[in-house]
Amino acid sequence: MIFSVSDLAHKWAMQRKPFYNQHTIKEGGDIRGKYTGNIGEFFFSEALQKNNIDHCCVGSSIHSHDFVVGSITIDTKAKERTYSYIDRPGRLDADEGHIALNQEGFACDIYVFASSHASSSAEPAQSVQFIGWISKASFWKQCQRVGKGEETAPNFFERADAGKLPYKKLSPMGLLLDNLSDHMTKNRFDKEIL
């Protein structure tokens, strides 16, 4: 799922209150990290709406997750990149999703990972691509735990104490949207995937 970022989405992401996405891994919890999280939330809400899935956006009041769909809680995890997976599809198998270790105890059922593409961190996002999703329990069971400053690849130093997981281990977004739709219409969710 790929979305082009409109002026409306960009303005919405820039105008959100400072406490939104306060748990960003970006150094110092900078405004760009918050913007990237906001833009990810904006388009996940769009995806739910396009699939007629009722949901509540709760990130401003809950802080442990961004959305509630029926009884399922979902946290979006967006990362800014200077390339698009459309232009560099091979990178998708190499890239990873990170979640700060201090979020392991947060009340959340599912993580949804997105990539925000911008030419540079000074430019507005051009597109947002949803990579996939995983249950919180599966993420923390499978992830590699890393420390801030740890060199985990040649000349790559981790920005935070975090759990990280290759994107190729995520489930496809279509499966999540189908399950959420079933959850709302038939009051069921395939619990095996949690």
Image (cartoon, grey):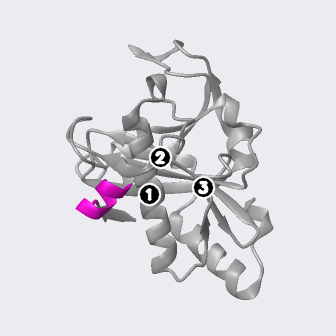
Mark found first going from the N terminus, 1 or 3: 3
Q: Callout 1: few (<14), some (14-19), or many (20+) C-alpha neighbours within 10 Å? A: many
Residue 156 tag number:
none
Residue placed under numbered mark 2 in the picture: 17
Magenta highlight on residue 45: no
Q: Callout 3: few (<14), some (14-19), or many (20+) C-alpha neighbours within 10 Å? A: many
Which kind of residue does numbered mark 3 sit on?
Answer: Asp
Residue placed under numbered mark 1 in the picture: 130
Which residue is found at the position 46% from the left and 71% from the top? 47
| Residue 123, image quadrant | top left
Look at the numbered disc 1 and give the secondary structure of its residue: strand
The alpha-carbon separation of the residues under discs 1 and 3 comes to 15 Å
Q: Position of residue 174 (x, y in %)?
A: 52, 71
Observer-nearest residue: 118 or 134? 118
Q: Which residues are magenta?
A: 5-12
Residue 66 tag number:
3
Relative height, residue 98 to residue 41 (above, below): above
Image marks 3 and 2: residues in contact by CB distance under 8 Å? no
Look at the numbered disc 3 and give the secondary structure of its residue: loop
Relative height, residue 28 to residue 122 (above, below): above
Q: Main secondary structure of the magenta part?
A: helix
Mark found first going from the N terminus, 3 or 2: 2
Tell me: 126 left or right of 178: left
Q: Position of residue 78 (x, y in %)?
A: 46, 46
Which kind of residue does numbered mark 1 sit on?
Answer: Phe
Which residue is found at the position 68% from the left and 46% from the top? 64
The alpha-carbon separation of the residues under discs 3 and 2 comes to 14 Å
Tell me: 97 left or right of 84: right
Q: Nearer the viewer, mark 1 or mark 3?
A: 3
Q: Nearer the viewer, mark 3 or mark 2?
A: 2
